Each structure stands twice: as C-alpha cells, then as structure tokens.
Image (spheres, helix red, strand yellow):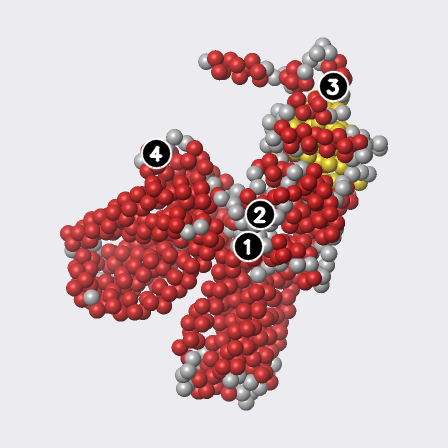
C-alpha cells in the first residue's frame, strides 16, 4: 500500500499546487457562497424534509430506493466502460508503471483505484442518501462508519466487475475494434439497462424478505455490519477474480492495442475532393481532416446516436396505437421540445472541444500562413453537427409521415431544430475555443468542466428561446391550429400565458432574444479569433 | 539587411525568468546555421518566436525580408518548421497528413501528392504513406514532419532537433538533404544537442547559454575565440565556451 500511495502522491501535489495558485478572492467568495448557500438550503429545503426520513414508514420506503441507487451503480458503471478501457490500456502513466520494478498486484491496485472513479457519482448519491437517513434517524457513529465501508465495497465490487469485462474483451476481441466499439456498445447496453429498470425495480419491490432484511439493516447496526461484510466479501472476491484476469490477460491486451494493422481504404481519401469544392481553399484542409478523423473514430458519434435513443424509446410505444390522431398535438410539442433540447447534449461533445481537441497540434496551423478565422470556419464545417442535423431531419420526415402532420407543421419542426442546431453549433464552437487550453497535458481535457457547463446552459437557454418563438409564431399566425390546444390548457402558467397574450410584446421580446443570440455568436466568434491569435504555444 | 534571418535584440521573458535575452544573430541565404546550447539555454524558445508560436517580449526578427511581428503571414509562407516532437493527427495516413499541411500553405491536392511522393520516397516512407500515423515509429514521425516542413518549398527551414531519433542511415539522408537544399539557396536554421552533427553539417554555429549568444562563427572562428588548437573538437570548444565540465562531472559521479 505504501507503493500505491507513492504512485498517487504526485496527484495530491498537483492538487495542492492548484489550490495554492488559485485566486484567493475567488476561493473566499466560493467558500462564503457554499457556506451561506448551504445554510440557506439546510434551513429552507432540507431540514423539514429530513424529519420525514425519521419515521418508521420512511425506513420501508427507503429500502426500495436503494434498488434505484444500485441500478444507478450498474448504469454508470456500464457507461464508464470506455473510461475503464482508457485507464487500463491507454493512460499516460502506464509505461512508467510497467517499466518500474513494481509487482503486478501494485499496478492492479493502482488501476483499480483509478478505475473506481467511474462509480463516484452513484457513490456520492448513495452517501448523501445514507447520511440524510442517518441524521434523520439519529444514528450513531458506527452507522456512518459501516455506511462508508458499504460504499467503498460497492465501488470496488462494481469497478472490479467492469474491469474484468474490459480485460476479457481486450484479450478476446481484436483490440482496435474493442477500443472503438466498446464505448458505443456500453452506451447502448446502458440504455437497455434504463429500459429494463422499471421491470427490475418492480421485481425488487416484490422481494419482501430481502426488503425487510435491508430495512432492518438500516436500523440495526449488527445487521448493517452483516450486510457490509457480505458486500465487502463480494468485493474482495470480484477484485480477486479481476486480478487473476489482469495477471493473465493484461499484457496480451496491452500489446494487442499497440498492434497497428489499420490501413484505411485508399479510396476514402482519394475520392473526397469533389464535395470540398464549395468551401474556401483555406477551410478545405480542416473540413477534410476533421471528417476523416470522425469517420475513423465512430465512438465520437456516440452522443449523436444516444441522443436519438430516448426519443425513439418514447415514440416506439406509440407505433400502432389507435390514439395517435388524438395525441397528435401533444406529440408535435414533444417532438419539438426533444429536438431543441436533446440536440444540446448531442452537439456539445463535438462542438465545444472542436478546437481544444487539437492541443499541441494547433502548432501546425499557428505556424502556417493561414488566418485564425479560416481555422474556426474549418472546424465549424468539419464538425459533426451536419450529421446531427441530418439525423433529426430524417427523423422528422419519418415522424411527420407516420403521425400524419401537415406539411407546414413538419416545416415548423424542421426550421426550429435546424436553427437550433446551426446557430447552437455556431455558439458552442467559438465558446469552446475561447475557453480551450491548447497546452493541456491531455488534449481531451482542454476544455474545463465549468466551461462546458456554461456553454450547455447558454445553449439550453437558446433552446428555450426557440421553443417560445415557435409557440409565439403559431399563436399569432395559426391561432386556429389544433396544435395549440394542449398549450391552451397551460395558459394558467404565466410564461405560457404571456406567449398567448394579445399584442406584440412577446413577439418583440422573442425577436430581441434571437438578435441577442446572433449577437453573441458574432461576439464569441471574434473573441475566439482574438484569443487564438494571441495564444502562445 | 543581408540576412535571410536576422534577430535584433530578440528577448523573451516568462515571468521573472528570461529565456532569451537580447539575441542578435544573422543567418545568410543558403547558409546552414547550427544553434547549440545546453538544455534550457533558450534554443526552442528562440525557434518558437521565429515561427510565430511565441511573441517576443522585446526586440524582433526579420525573416526573408519580413518582420515576424508586422508581417507574420508572409514570414510563415517563407518558413518551413519542424518541431522537436512534430504534432500530428494520429488517425490520418501519412499522405493525408501531407495533404492537410499542404492545404494550410495553399497547395492543391495534386501538388501535395506529387511533392509528397518525392519527399516520402527520399526519406523512405513511401511504403508507409497509406498507413495511419498512429502506427509510425518516432523516427518515421520525424521524417514525415520533415516532409511536411519541406512540402511548400520554403526559403527558410527552421528545424528543432531535426536528427533526433533518426537511425544513422536516415540521419545521413537528412544531412545530405540539408546540404542539397542549402546548395539550392534554402537557408537552414537548426538546433541540436549533437555536436558532431553541428560540426559536420553547419557552415556556422551559434552557442546559446542562459538565453544569450555567447559565441558565433565558423569552426575556425570558434577555435580562435576559445584559443584552442586546430584539433579541438566542437565538443571541447563547446565545453570550454560554456564553462562546462560535464564530462569530468559525469565521470566523477559514476566513480562514486
């Protein structure tokens, strides 16, 4: 364990340095905000609700809730398989670890600890739930200690299982295929898990003996200890199994991943010239290279495909339903809202890091006689948003045909979502470039989480603006349309009522909002140009 | 100004650290100029300023008659640059990468393919041209980087450790290529740690220490400067001029 600690020590030094170099004023403001915000949230949002958890019935309700959290563990664990793959076989520290005189079990423990980060989110959710429960029930220190052990055991168990699967896959299946397709397969599997969650939760709720045992364990420390020991035992077994696979299969998988046999089809790059002609000469190299890179790493398209899945899952049950005509107006608004808001997530993973992903490769275009404007334009046209747009347009065409929407109704869907995707991409891409750190050690992390969050918030607000604009347009130009019926029932809700109000205030405000959005696009674009021009590499 | 590269008081500071200080040097057309110095002397910083990746804190430089700060695009058009670890897109093939870089310099695909094929053949990469770069060795990447730097037929070549990681055969080819290019009028400015290479390849050598040029000239001039014998190697001159006792220090350390 001393060796494991020594390996992780540099990360703490880095963290320490980062904290020390942080702006003290900003840190003070953050601490104050967290302090006051926490106090306010405790007084106004949490304290009263927490007392509800103190009742006996809460215990019986709390036990089934654990089922959902366990599902979350599984879901997040499966989604994180791509991350586990990267940490196991492609992380920067691997060569250092492998050449150092370290026993294999030390490397395994280091990798297990690193990979356990994929279970961090559900562990935090479970920790919060257990802490709230402990406070409400007035549990003693033993409860919290055991709860902590329970969490750690859960994290190790899930991580070890996921690691075993990844190690086995990398050994059995051609490595390059695993590398590219694993994240896609994992995400599709995760969707199936979500789909099956209702069924599993229902099954879990019927397991009375198990639930009673869980409920008792929550109140009785001795029983909680049994549960913790059982889970810890399972975690140790799973970790032991993962270690055996690691010891037997890791080197093979690792060397497989380094085998390069990929010789892309020659025709692919040679026949690409014609479609580049509409683009300006300086933009073409970026468009072509970006599209080639995208084609050779289909896992990057996962967000586009995943975004469509919830939409399909929602609409598949409607196929063959006799209530389609009756539900048509509702379906229209659902389609529009999903198109506007889901495109946000589907686009962000490609547009926000479009420039930052280059990292040190930016030196190629910085040292070349090419304007930064051409670089940004190249990255914009070479981005995956046209694919997202195409997918949505196809989906609207099919949905319009199946659900029997009028031509103008499909046109509204198409126009609104096209506007959202194109202007949204034009908003996110320069924003990402503006906040990108081209000197980041790992170019995949060149855009900070906070920047991505801000960009997504901005894009979400733009989606809201577009939804409002679509409603407002229909209210004023097609007031007799059946599409407005479900919304009229919501006019008691003031924002909807405001859209239905007489006069042109809403139209003016929404038009103003659109102008502001376009202004922001221009502003971000210019700011990104300036930033990249002055960026030193 | 008669130099193809002229730096005038070129300075670069990183906070309190001065990486390059008041650098004055001139490289003539068709000359091969070796830029030597111990680790951290400021060689790469100088090169990055010349190619427009870093802005000078003071002074300036003129390349091919254009000021690097006033006319950066004109300078970039004239320069071919090879970085110490050439940045590349792993999932492009060698040929696609050359097309990409050629495109940045305004070359069309046909010219990129034609010149690219010549350069790839010259550096023995033809067979690898259709393979993804992620499968290239370090030396192959370096050679591909050199092909990319030469693709637009620059007037000035700025190379940061151009022979690092090359096998002796490839290194010989690159040396011959540099001589050939210089013979055709291309100015070559390169940094290196390998004194033997500088001695054999360069017309003139500049020695940088702690950001300042402490000696510059042909081998004969450097010998005169260091008051050495005609048999002194560049290594001896380098250690003498930089005040280093590296060899003795290493030997002493190994004896311990």
Provide the secondary structure element on which disc 1 rests.
helix
The disc numbered 1 marks a residue on which chain?
A
Residue appearing at x 49%, y 81% in the figure? A402
Q: Nearer the viewer, mark 4 or mark 2?
A: 2
Q: Position of residue B230 (x, y in %)?
A: 73, 11
Report, in whole angstroms, how far the alpha carbon at label 2 lies from the one at label 1: 10 Å
Q: Earlier in the sequence, mark 3 or mark 2?
A: 2
Residue B38: x and y, percent?
A: 62, 24
Q: Quadrant of the N terminus of chain A?
A: top left
Say whether mark 1 and mark 2 are on the same chain. no
Mark 1, residues whose alpha carbon is within 10 Å: few (<14), some, or many (≥20)?
some
| Residue B192, label in figure | none
Foreground: disc 1 or disc 4: 1
Q: Is residue A65 left or right of residue B52?
A: left
- Asked if one can make out residue A488 in the rendered structure from this viewpoint, the answer is no
Q: Which residue corresponds to mark 4?
A: A103
Q: Chain of mark 2?
A: B
Residue on which disc 3 sits? B219
Q: Position of residue A166 (x, y in %)?
A: 38, 50
Residue A296: numbered disc: 1
């Amino acid at each position: 364990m001393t060796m494991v600690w020594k390996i992780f020590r540099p990360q703490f030094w880095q963290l320490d340095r980062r904290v020390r170099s942080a702006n003290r004023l900003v840190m003070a403001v953050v601490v104050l905000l967290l302090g006051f915000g926490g106090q306010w949230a405790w007084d106004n949002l949490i304290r009263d609700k927490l007392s509800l958890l103190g009742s006996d019935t809460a215990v019986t309700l709390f036990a089934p809730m654990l089922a959902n959290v366990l599902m979350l563990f599984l879901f997040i664990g499966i989604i994180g398989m791509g991350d586990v793959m990267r940490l196991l076989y492609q992380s920067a520290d691997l060569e250092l670890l492998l050449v150092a005189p370290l026993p294999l079990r030390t490397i395994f423990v280091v990798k297990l600890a690193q990979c356990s980060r994929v279970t961090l989110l559900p562990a935090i959710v479970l920790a919060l739930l257990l802490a709230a429960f402990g406070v409400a029930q007035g549990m003693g220190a033993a409860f919290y200690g055991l709860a902590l052990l329970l969490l750690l055991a859960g994290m190790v168990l899930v991580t070890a299982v996921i690691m075993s699967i990844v190690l086995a896959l990398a050994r059995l299946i051609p490595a390059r295929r695993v590398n590219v397709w694993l994240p896609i397969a994992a995400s599709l599997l995760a969707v199936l898990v979500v789909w099956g969650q209702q069924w599993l939760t229902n099954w879990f709720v019927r397991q009375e003996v198990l639930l009673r045992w869980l409920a008792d364990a929550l109140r009785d420390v001795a029983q909680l200890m049994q549960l913790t020991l059982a889970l810890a035992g399972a975690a140790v077994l799973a970790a032991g199994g993962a270690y055996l696979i690691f010891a037997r299969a890791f080197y093979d998988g690792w060397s497989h991943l380094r085998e390069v046999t990929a010789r892309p089809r020659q025709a692919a790059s040679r026949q690409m010239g014609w479609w580049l002609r509409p683009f300006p000469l300086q933009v073409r190299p970026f468009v072509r290279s970006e599209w080639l890179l995208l084609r050779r790493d289909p896992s990057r398209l996962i967000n586009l495909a995943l975004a469509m899945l919830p939409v399909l899952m929602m609409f598949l049950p409607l196929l063959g339903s006799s209530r389609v005509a009756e539900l048509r107006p509702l379906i229209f608004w659902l389609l529009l809202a999903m198109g506007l808001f889901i495109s946000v997530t589907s686009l962000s993973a490609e547009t926000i890091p479009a420039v930052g992903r280059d990292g040190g490769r930016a030196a190629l275009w910085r040292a070349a006689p090419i304007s930064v404007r051409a670089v940004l334009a190249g990255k914009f046209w070479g981005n995956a948003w046209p694919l997202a747009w195409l997918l949505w347009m196809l989906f609207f065409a099919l949905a319009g045909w199946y659900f029997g929407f009028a031509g103008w109704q499909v046109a509204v869907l198409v126009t609104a979502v096209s506007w959202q995707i194109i202007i949204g991409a034009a908003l996110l891409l320069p924003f990402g470039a503006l906040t990108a750190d081209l000197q980041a050690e790992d170019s995949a992390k060149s855009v900070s989480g906070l920047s991505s969050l801000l960009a997504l918030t901005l894009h979400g607000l733009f989606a809201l603006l577009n939804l409002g604009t679509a409603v407002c347009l229909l209210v004023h130009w097609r007031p007799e349309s059946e599409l407005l019926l479900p919304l009229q029932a919501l006019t008691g809700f003031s924002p909807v009522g405001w859209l239905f109000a007489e006069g042109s205030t809403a139209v003016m405000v929404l038009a103003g909002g659109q102008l502001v959005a376009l202004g922001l696009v221009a502003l971000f674009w210019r700011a990104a140009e300036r930033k990249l021009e002055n960026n030193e590499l | 100004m008669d130099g193809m590269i002229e730096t005038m008081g070129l300075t670069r500071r990183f906070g309190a650290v001065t990486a390059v200080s008041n650098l004055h040097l001139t490289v003539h057309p068709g000359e091969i100029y070796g830029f030597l110095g111990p680790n951290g002397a400021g060689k790469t910083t100088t090169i990055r300023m010349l190619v427009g990746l870093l802005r000078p804190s003071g002074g300036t430089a003129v390349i091919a008659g254009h000021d690097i700060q006033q006319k950066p695009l004109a300078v970039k058009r004239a320069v071919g640059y090879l970085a110490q670890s050439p940045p590349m897109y792993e999932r492009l093939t060698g040929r696609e990468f050359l097309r990409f870089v050629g495109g940045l310099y305004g070359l069309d695909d046909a010219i990129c393919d034609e010149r690219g094929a010549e350069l790839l053949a010259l550096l023995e990469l033809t067979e690898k041209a259709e393979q993804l770069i992620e499968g290239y060795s370090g030396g192959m990447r370096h050679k591909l980087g050199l092909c990319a730097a030469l693709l637009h037929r620059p007037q000035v070549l700025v190379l940061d450790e151009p022979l690092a990681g090359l096998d002796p055969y490839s290194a010989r080819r690159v040396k011959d290529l540099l001589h050939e290019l210089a013979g055709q009028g291309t100015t070559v400015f390169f940094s290196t740690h390998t004194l033997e290479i500088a001695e054999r390849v360069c017309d003139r050598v500049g020695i940088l220490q702690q950001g300042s040029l402490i000696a510059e000239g042909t081998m004969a001039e450097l010998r005169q400067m260091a008051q050495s014998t005609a048999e002194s190697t560049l290594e001896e001159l380098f250690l003498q001029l930089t005040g280093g006792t590296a060899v003795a220090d290493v030997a002493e350390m190994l004896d311990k």
